[in-house]
Amino acid sequence: MKITFLGTGTSDGVPMVACGCRVCRSRDRRDNRTRTSAMIEHEGKRIIIDTGIDFRAQMLRHRVNRIDAIMLTHPHADHVFGLDELRQYNRIAGTIPIYANRYTIGEIHTRFGYFFNPPQRGGGVSDIDLIEMKRPMQVCGLTVTPLPVRHGILDILGFQIEDTAYITDASFIPETVLKKIRGCSVLVLNALRYRKHPTHFNIAQAVAIAEQVKAKHTYFVHMTHDVMHRELVRELPRGMAPAYDGLSLTV
Ligand SMILES: [Zn+2]
Ligand SMILES: [Zn+2]
Ligand SMILES: [Zn+2]
């Protein structure tokens, strides 16, 4: 399977609006981070993990002409506000299955109530089928295991897709999950910035988790404008690197 990092930025994106800091002004394209999202491709099928505010731009950038499934980690705006852009994909592929936990499904019902109960017939609305993921499931021919993690006080999901673990926006990973993903081929993990944060791992915490997991390769995502790509590359231990928009790996 192939994994492509569609976005690697925190909720503000980088550059951030109305900011002139050195990272926001950087000419290194790896410092240009849209909101965190990834695409998994396997035997001609495509799964998108999180559909944030930059979803449309990411689909155009990668010329994605069909989506077969979506997996949502949690319902924050930077992870779900692109759901309104599914209409064209519905015309191509019909109803799109979305895998998420119960909390996220409840929030999607509230925020996107008009998908389920349109006030009038008109421009059309996204057509989705919300499927609760409580245990390992087959998605587009891949075995996907939900990884329950904490984002502050919120219970959100990471996903293990075959031998790749994808965890974003976490601030705590339970021992049972760490055990499950130990020694995986690829670990994708959020690392917000150098300073601590109440609801996201900072870089030091993410490195400590990565050292426990001991994946063959670890890639960090969901970074703010405090992080200069080329500096972080030099600072990280072997086997760990910041991801960047457009990076793709065959696992
Ligand atoms: Zn986020
Ligand atoms: Zn900035
Ligand atoms: Zn979040």
Image (cartoon, rainbow, N blue to C red):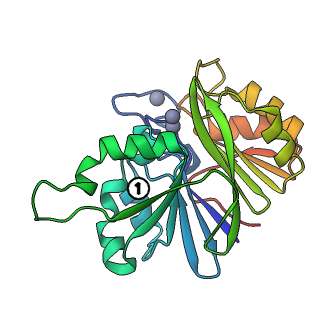
Write the residue at 39% across / 28% down.
19
Q: Residue 101, percent across and down?
A: 55, 46
Write the residue at 78% across / 37% down.
234
Q: Nearer the viewer, residue 251 or 27?
A: 251
Q: Can you say whether 209 is above or below 94 in the image?
A: above
Q: Nearer the viewer, residue 10 or 144?
A: 144
Q: Is residue 163 visible?
A: yes
Q: Nearer the viewer, residue 188 or 240?
A: 188
- The residue under label 1 is 55
Write the residue at 30% across / 71% down.
88
* Residue type, label 1: Phe
The N terminus is located in which quarter?
bottom right
Disc 1 crowd, CA 10 A, few/some/many (<14, 14-19, 20+): many
Q: Is residue 168 visible?
A: no
Write the residue at 21% across / 54% down.
117
Q: Residue 33, percent across and down?
A: 51, 45
